[in-house]
Image (cartoon, coloured by chain):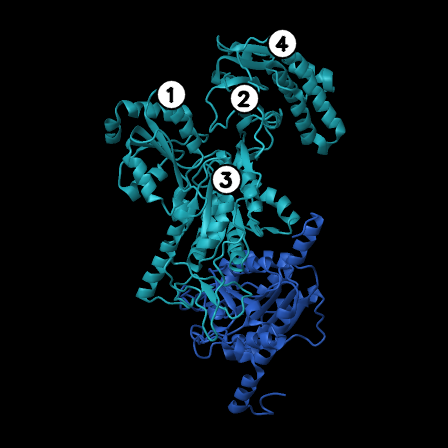
Chain colours: A blue, B cyan
Amino acid sequence: MSIMERPVFVDDKLREVRQSGRLEYRSRSLPTWCPGCGYFSIVEGVTYACNEMGIAKEQAVVVSGIGCSSRFPFFVDLFGFHTLHGRVLPVATGVKTANDKLTVIAVGGDGDGFAIGGGHISHAAKRNVDITYLLFDNGIYGLTKGQTSPLSAVGLRTSTSPFDNPEQPLNPLMMVLAYGASWVGQAYAGRPDHLREMITKAIAHRGFSYLHILSPCVTFDKTSKTYVNLGLRVRELPSGHDATDLMAALRQARDQESLAIGLYYQESRPTLNATFEQLVAKAGGGR
Amino acid sequence: MKATDIQIALCGSAGDGTIAAGDILRNAVARAGYRVISFDVYPPEIRGFGKCISRVRITTEQSYALKRQSDVFVSLDDSHAIPHVGEVRPDGAVIFESQPVATVAEGHHISGHIHPGHIPYGIPLRELSEKSTGGGRSRNLVVLGYIAGLLGLAAEHFLSIIEKKFTKQGSEVVSRNQAGFHAGFQAGAATFKLDNVFFTPLGAPHGSEQVVMLSGNAAVAQGCMDAHLDTFFGYPITPATSIMERLAVALPKRGARLLQTEDEISAMAASIGAGFAGARAATATSGPGLALMSEMIGLATMAEVPCVVFVSQRGGPSTGMPTKTEQSDLNAALYGSPGDSQHIVIAPTNVEGCYRCAGKAFEMAERYQTPVIVLLDLYLSNRYETVTLAVSGPPFNLNANKPRPRLEAGEVYKRYALTDDGISPRAIPGDAGCMHVITGLEHNELGRPSDQEEMHAAMSRKRHDKLLGALQHPDFTVSKRFGDPGRVKVGLLSWGSTFGECLEAMFMAQAEGIPCAAMKVVMLAPFPVQPVADFMADCDVVLVPECNYEGQFAHLVQGILAKPVVRLSRVPGSPMPVEAILGEVRRLARGAVTAIAS
């Protein structure tokens, strides 16, 4: 049912949100993002997912890097670690290695993940460390006031590419699929209902789950990834898409003109912590 | 009867089994009850024809450094051994191959280089090996047997060590090597002894302690195990790798975890992540890896996360000399991270210290909520010493966390509460009601980002002041003075592996009648200002020997105490020669004042 068929009234929405219990997961700090930023819907999505899954607040850790997206931990009432630029995944790996019981959510932006931190994604994926990586892709460095990122579109004019960005952006989904991530999906901040379901599934997955979240930067990008442009380009994955077929997932990921949202690929294999336990058994050890 | 003090050096080419022979020798004499210090020199290549030397000093009481002159010298390869003949003392033994396989050009056989005072023992090593084992590869075992037979050491310990060492390769290899040893032993026992190298029989061992032989890195690994390390993250780098290799075997046996990460940044990052989550976490690296970790160490300082970093220094800068020792990462360890990021830096001075510092580092990291860097170097990591461990069990506090915070109803948990000693009660994920975010940003007591002037000043003070408690950390030697009490002519102030050489030099200077004392500084940050100032006030002149070019420790001391010291900064890539220190002590004892002026 679309918005056109049934209007949403603010009072109804507020009542629903208050009654759901997910406000419990919001912190007392108000987000510092610009009005209209797509990231608000990600906070909403994570609190929704935690509430739906009944995750105890003290049993969840949000680890982040540096950037607009990485201020995220301050806006939820969970344990959080705001680390260094690009280092969210190795820190999150350490947290999960130390305590099997924790739900670990890693968050970061496109520059944090695919520029400075690009070397870590492949290893987190290969180890299948049981964390959820939410990558906030606005295609620009927002916190430093608008510079080119490795996911910026060709032709984007920024303060560091004043004669328009000449470089082709990376294809993050193809990369992560090739790295062997055991859960790969994409969502769009402009479709919050779909987004929160995807976040819930990603957290529920046992192993390394990668959710690519498309989001506009309303302040520094007026031409490329705007709500209008992204809204026109985003599509759903074909109804017959087989999420166990890696090649089908790669074919869908290759199309960067129309951006498919949904679950691209999923497989089940031992997590890093499970392999640690196998190793302990092999060594004949135990605590 | 004179106490035993014999140094045996074995020299050969890579592939001769030189290091293997040295390893059997030191283990066998340690098992016999002697004290050992031993250090091997080998080339950075796995194959090739580089020079290998294994030196083993065997004593009745524990010694602190190798001697410059060996009592027994073995050549398994004359081209490498000839330049080292001079390190044999007068009346010492030189053992070499008497029947080379091919004609040797004039001057290329060691017999032409032996000094008049040396006692030569030319023996047909290859022939004995071939006769006893059917091949020439056991020359190293033959020569070991020869030494044991010649010097009257019991064969039993050698044979059991040989069995232990080769048992994985099958009983045939064990018996072949034992046969080679026997052949050498008989030849040695049948030789008329002309040298004056004698072992003194040992008294009964003390029952209250166990003596084991460990390398520095093995001692670190043992300290980690005894401190109940939960998680280790590492990336291979010489000379720290063997810490990780040992833990890779030991940790899973205790149900603990080790992960080889994609780089040093990740190793440090994951250690901090695990430390934040409440586990005991550590990593190990060398100088180049420390450089990669330094941003992360700053994060742990700012976010007040406990974690331990073992840094085994090697020759630098950059890739430098990976298989040579140096003490040139002191500055990087102290000041490597951006901002005013003081953390604890400790440097053991011997192998036993490696064990204690490793275990204590975890206590300090947890107690003071900070990264702790344990500075080793290649010489300390790779040298072997007999170490006395208490039979009563490991002397480490296994949970040095401050009592977890207890909150009143409705109270908001303050992760960085400002307290008298600067230490805030630390909650970890899983502690109900204590949710908080830690960050590398400057923050307020709640941990929320704040760049207010007063807050930054208060938090900076907290981060520095809380570390001062470490100077009084229980059962930890922060600094210690040795030698003559009271006023002395020359004081040796040193740190790390070079301190052993300083002690030896001090004993020799005292024997010459020079009033002399030595102080080791184990805790380099925070700096034990008062003990060092007191020591320096007692000395006419202070000499600071260290293995780096810039005199980094001397610089630190002068910067903090604003008093002059005399530097003895050398970068030989090998341990500081005792004679170099002694020579400087003599010179300073003669005219200390001019030395300071220069």
Comes first in the chain, label 4 or label 3:
4
Q: Label 4's element?
A: loop
Distance from the alpha carbon under mark 4 to that under mark 1: 36 Å
Rendered image quadrant of residue B45: top right
Of all chains, the one bearing label 4 is B
Cβ atoms under marks 4 and 3 closer than 8 Å: no
Distance from the alpha carbon under mark 4 to that under mark 3: 42 Å
Distance from the alpha carbon under mark 2 to that under mark 1: 26 Å
Q: Which mark is residue B354?
A: 3
Comes first in the chain, label 3 or label 1:
3
Cβ atoms under marks 2 and 3 closer than 8 Å: no
- Point out the frontmost of discs 2 and 4: 4
The amino acid marked with disc number 4 is Thr
Of all chains, the one bearing label 1 is B
Q: Which residue matches tag 4?
A: B191
Of all chains, the one bearing label 2 is B
Residue A235: where, in percent of width, then height?
61, 77
Q: Which residue matches tag 2?
A: B9
Q: Label 1's element?
A: helix
Q: Where is the N terminus of chain A found, in terms of image quarters?
A: bottom right
Viewer-closest of B158 and A222 = B158
Q: Do dots 2 and 1 share one subunit?
A: yes
Residue A152: where, in percent of width, then height?
49, 67
Cβ atoms under marks 2 and 4 closer than 8 Å: no
The amino acid marked with disc number 1 is Ala
Rendered image quadrant of residue A17: bottom right
The amino acid marked with disc number 2 is Ala
Q: Which residue matches tag 1?
A: B511
Judged left or right of residue B371, residue B173 is: right
The amino acid marked with disc number 3 is Cys
Comes first in the chain, label 4 or label 1:
4
Residue B358: where, in percent of width, then height?
51, 44
